[in-house]
Image: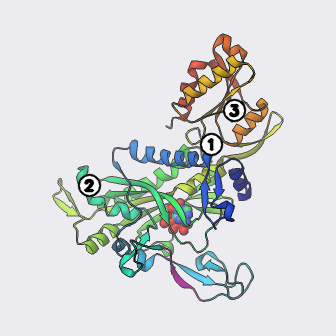
Amino acid sequence: MSTDMDTIVSLCKRRGFIFQSSEIYGGLGSTWDYGPLGVELKNNVKRAWWRDMVYRRDDMEGLDAAILMHPKVWEASGHVAGFTDPLVDCKECKKRFRADHIEGTVCPECGGGLTEARQFNLMFKTFLGPVEDDAALAYLRPETAQGIFVNFANVLESRRRKLPFGIAQIGKSFRNEITPGNFTFRTREFEQMEMEFFVEPSTANEWFDYWVHERHNWYFRYGMRPENVRLRAHGDDELAHYAQGCYDVEYLFPMGWSELEGIAHRGDYDLKAHATASGRNLTYFDDKTRQRYVPYVIEPAAGADRATLAFLVDAYREEEIRERKRTVLKLHPALAPFKVAVLPLLRNRPEVVETARKLYADLRRFFPADYNDTGAIGRLYARQDEVGTPFCITIDVQTLEDQQVTIRDRDTTEQERIGIDRVRTYVQDKMVIE
Ligand code: ATP
């Protein structure tokens, strides 16, 4: 069973991972800011995704589309008419709930009667330019996917791509969620990591299976515990209007199994809809078969904030090692905010401090490192364990003689002596992903 959410929220605040937004004004509901360590962790999650989805494949292109898009995009995609959640109000306490999230027919807070469900559109509206009228209406995108569909032909042509290939994108999305909550799990502003994979229609089912397994396994590659991750197939009644099939990768969050990522078989729904609405040709010509068709699409859509939260929850341990209690974040070295901490043992010996500072400066040319000489070594280790730093290096007087340092492993707490000139490659080797 995973840790409770309050423990994670409090560690995140105490150690600079995640703060409540606008906290000095009392906070803004369900809005969070990533602090010094949180921004590193989330960037590392996004970097890991990008590296595996884009750099390490030869069938992928990257994209960074604008958040604001032509309003017709959202009509064509079905979002204006259909991107809604059923909303019910409690007649007594006036709280609002998503009808599909509550069991029974009374208010889960006070037991009062509920109104009939009505549809509530989740898109945030805004206005382009100084006049706030319908002609200037625009939406903050509720997903990044549509930016990919409208650029399908641009990417295909500019990169002379053949099918199958994918377009990957990471960026902010906005949804006016009725009931946000559970820390960063459901917020109104969040980041998505989405990819649309375009294929010849008869191969779509095979590619769907491929991506479901590929994305499920991705989380294990970065050390997530297998018992906390599962795949769940959507029932026919759950499928979105565009989907021919859908799987969720679910994580055992403190509030129970919840969606981390969805992998959908979207058929030719999106490209067809945009071709019809824009009047542009969004077909693909296959020179081998001399046929023209609308590609089918497989979409793995993940959340950067949700993945970051899941990695945090999964890494969190309270344990006793060598008769000492400690809190440790066993984050994969590729995800850890600091890869290493340099800790001089004798801060009143100038040569020791100088050697430590020099190593620290050298390592920072390659990856984020921390430096601390302000406490007893036990306390310094404990602080690094709590933020998930995989390695601590101590420099002592002997280092001055033999050019060796002590390197301590976060997970085993074991220590070994290695040459000071080997520290960088030692740490870098542990960050490599198979
Ligand atoms: P849910 O059912 O939880 O509302 P969804 O099925 O509508 O999610 P998708 O549209 O499939 O979500 O979005 C893909 C991914 O984007 C989700 O798996 C999740 O990781 C992330 N995501 C979606 N909505 C939010 C949100 N409000 N806050 C944080 N992440 C989100």
Depth check, mark 2 against mark 3: the one in front is 3
First-in-chain label (2 vs 1): 2
306 vs 23, left or right, is left
Question: In the image, what residue occupies the spot 58% across and 46% down?
Answer: 41
As for residue 120 lying within the magenta part, the answer is yes
SS state under label 1: loop
As for residue 283 lying within the magenta part, the answer is no
| Numbered badge on residue 77 | none
Three-letter amino acid code of the residue under disc 1: Leu
416 vs 222, left or right, is right
Mark 3 burial class by Cα count in 10 Å: few <14, some 14-19, many 20+ = some
First-in-chain label (2 vs 3): 2
* Contact (Cβ within 8 Å) of mark 2 with mark 1: no
Depth check, mark 3 against mark 1: the one in front is 3
Q: Quadrant of the N terminus?
A: bottom right
Q: CA distance from mark 3 to mark 1?
A: 20 Å
Mark 2 burial class by Cα count in 10 Å: few <14, some 14-19, many 20+ = some
Three-letter amino acid code of the residue under disc 2: Leu
Residue 94 seen anywhere in this rendered image of the structure: yes
SS state under label 3: loop
Q: Residue furthest front?
A: 130
**Residue named by callout 1:** 331
Towards the viewer: 127 or 307: 127
x, y percentage for residue 411?
A: 69, 36
* Rendered image quadrant of residue 79: bottom left
**Residue named by callout 3:** 372
